[in-house]
Image: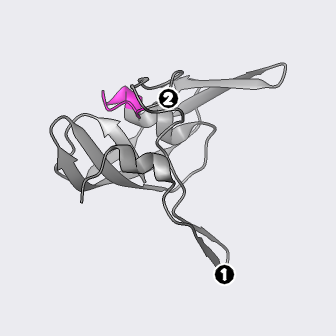
Amino acid sequence: VAIVDGKVVEEIEIDKPILTTKDRGSAKSKIDMKRGKSAKTTVYPLLVEGRKSKIKIVIESGRTHQIRVHLNSLGLPILGDAIYGRTAPNVNRVLLHSKITKIFDYKFESQEPREFKVYDFN
């Protein structure tokens, strides 16, 4: 789940290759059509308020910073993301949260952090 700057009103499939470069404990990723590795992300709208959207994200691959890079490439930066997205007042973290994680036959669920309440869509 993420909160992005921009209106998401229909399902979006992003299929763009990502190249990650690593340097002394940090990594930076970008879309690279020639050297990038396959990466697929599907975005589902949940709620829209003004120019902000709360979205559900499902990834099929698992590239470094995949969600952040893919959303930014569409002009939908994640709020609070100073590297790939957009900083915002009253937001001290990237508004991206793994609400449900499925690995093999295991499923983990976690409530949204309180920072998501800054943009109360309810």
Q: What is the magenta range?
A: 72-79
Mark number, residue 77: none
Residue 62 pos. (x, y %): 60, 49
- The residue tagged 2 is 81
Residue 11 pos. (x, y %): 24, 54
Q: Nearer the viewer, mark 1 or mark 2?
A: 2
Side of 67 where 11 appears, left or right: left
Query: What's the image's color scheme?
Result: one colour
Q: Quadrant of residue 102?
A: bottom right
As drawn, 49 above or below 110: above
What kind of residue is marked 1?
Answer: Asp
As drawn, 21 above or below 50: above
**Is 102 contained in the magenta span?**
no
The residue lying toward the viewer, choosing from 14 and 103, is 103
The residue lying toward the viewer, choosing from 19 and 82, is 82
- The residue tagged 1 is 105
On-image quarter of the N terminus: bottom left
Side of 19 where 45 appears, left or right: left
- Name which residue lies at 24% across and 60% down: 122
